[in-house]
Image: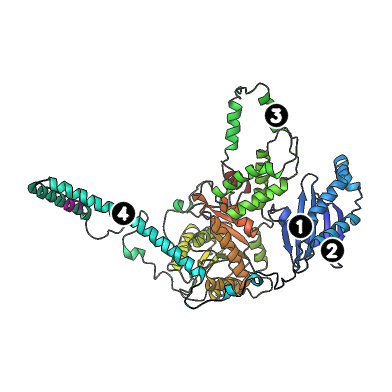
Amino acid sequence: MLDFFTIFSKGGLVLWCFQGVRGPAATAPVNALIRSVLLQERGGNNSFTHEALTLKYKLDNQFELVFVVGFQKILTLTYVDKLIDDVHKEFRDKYRNEFQQKGALGLLNGTFDFKDDFMRLLRDAEESSKVRAPTVMKTFEQSLKSQKTVKCMIETRGEKPKEKVKNKKNKGSKKDGTEAVAAPNKASAADKQLSAAGDKEELTKDEILQKNREEFFRRHMKAGEKSRSPKPDAQKEKGKKPRVWDLGNSNAKVLDYSNSATNGSAETCPVEEFDPDMALGDKNREPGRLYDLEYESDDEVEEEKVVQNPSKPSVKKGGLGGMFGMLKGLVGSKSLTRDDMDPVLEKMKDHLIAKNVAAEIAVQLCESVAKKLEGKVMGTFTTVTSTVKQALQEALVQILQPQRRVDVLRDVMDAQRHRRPYVVTFCGVNGVGKSTNLAKISFWLIENGFSVLIAACDTFRAGAVEQLRTHTRRLNALHPPESHGGRTMVQLYEKGYGKDAAGIAMEAISYARNQGFDVVLVDTAGRMQDNAPLMTALAKLIAVNAPDLVLFVGEALVGNEAVDQLVKFNKALADHSMAQTPRLIDGIVLTKFDTIDDKVGAAISMTYITSKPIVFVGTGQTYCDLRSLNAKAVVAALMKA
């Protein structure tokens, strides 16, 4: 049984509605469909689930209409697809003239009496989907067994079944075939031996001996060349020489920092002297500002070339036929069909996959664009390719623009007013740059005047605590306490290795509250999304400490793997959480963006899967290489040929 069926325009005007059962109105699920699917360009699948309801919808792009049907998701209604297609066709045909002649005024002032037609279509759809009566079982006389005689079912001793005899015959034929193949081979080998013997008989004994010696020496020379290894021109000295880095030091005492801070303390590390320009990179930057990601598009350059180079006279093909053919392809004279768009969408899909967009998401994006454009009348002097490309660009920009913007500085100031630290937890797979980007975010927060406590909760990876200790030392060198009224801007809270990460995070948050720190950045161990024990430990850390922001750190180099990582991280956090509403990923940090040129598809894949914003983008190795996402710049890079 249907809960509701509604027809409304894309402008939000409800034209007709049917309420099937007594209960809550269709407003909440339809609004959720509009927010989560239609506005976010996720129309690749015509089904949407909201709480206990399943919603199916169909778009009419010619008249800008949306048809939505809702029913309980525990039900399996096979006639829903047929019903929505029939209603769409009937409603269009009945009110076509009203839409075409009056336009928007027809929607506002029109009266749509569609209840009788809908009930008729609903009855027809239900009748067509009724389960057929079960087929009657065959009688014994109708079966093949009744046609067999008793004689054919009697087996005599010593006689084998016919199937086995056939198989043996086949095996025998195979053996005969192999023997037949082997026979000519043997014969050919015998002919060769006979011919060689005949040649030897023609030679004298001395000539035969000389020939055998030459063959012997030739074989041994070849074997010696194969076994002989090429000798180097100059013998290298045995043993390895230690590599000396430009910023390193060969003195072991200088490199030993083991006594600089003891485990279990949150004391500040000694200030390290180093060149600040190498750690900061850009000298002309504005302190504390998070710049947008930039990308230079080639569209402006191409437009300038077109203006500078006037169009050359084209070669005439068939008189005026070429000109009229061109105008016919440009002038909008018909509505778009799926056959018109399929070749263009196929090229667009391959282009997106080549730009590192996950294959599954590329297919869904193209399907969403096709549903959005199908039936839409093309504008004047526009081609199918330009129309599809423009629609795809708009869809990509809409996907990259988050539903809820994450403003970290505003949230930190709000936490300050409540006299508590703002807690951020970083999670992700191994080697994506969690600790490095945590240090970049620490530097950005310090430059905005906030004090930071780094919680070293990666108690598994060797060197993880020492890496954070080095970052803390360098950050204190860039922002010494003397520049901030004697206040230490960044400290490290660590308890060594092999300890419970959730407990360390809890102690660090308590320490930050007592000492008056503004922000706590929790670094966690890298883990693969398939490792159930480690994912359980991460869910425990988040559930126990309830951070204000959970950031997933992913690298821009991944393609299809990004989908698997995010889906399984979110699933693990939901499955292993004790709360009724589990805490999932709130945002994304996209790292190594400077290594991919224009293959920026990972940004699309990650935001499409989670519907969460990309909060930070890592673009280099210095502390200033942190950017905010610019949706238009990413789409420009993605659509670049």
Q: Secondary structure at mark 4?
A: helix
Residue 220 falls within the magenta-colored stretch = yes
| Amino acid at dot 2 | Ala
Q: Mark 3 — residue? A: 327
Looking at the magenta stretch, what is its main secondary structure? helix
| Mark pair 4, 2: CA separation | 85 Å
Q: Which residue is mark 1?
A: 81
Number of the label disc, if any, that sits on residue 25: 2
Q: Earlier in the sequence, mark 3 or mark 1?
A: 1
Residue 304 in view of the camera: yes
Magenta-colored span:
218-222
Of residues 258 and 189, the one drawn nearer to the viewer in this rendering: 189
Q: CA distance from mark 3 to mark 2?
A: 50 Å
The residue carrying mark 4 is 185
User: What percent of the width, then of the height, locates residue 420?
Assistant: 63, 69
Specify few, some or many for label 1: CA neighbours under 10 Å numbering under 14, 14-19, or 20 or more: some
Contact check, label 4 and label 1, Cβ < 8 Å: no
In x, y percent, where is residue 214?
Answer: 13, 48
The mark that comes first in sequence, 2 or 1, is 2
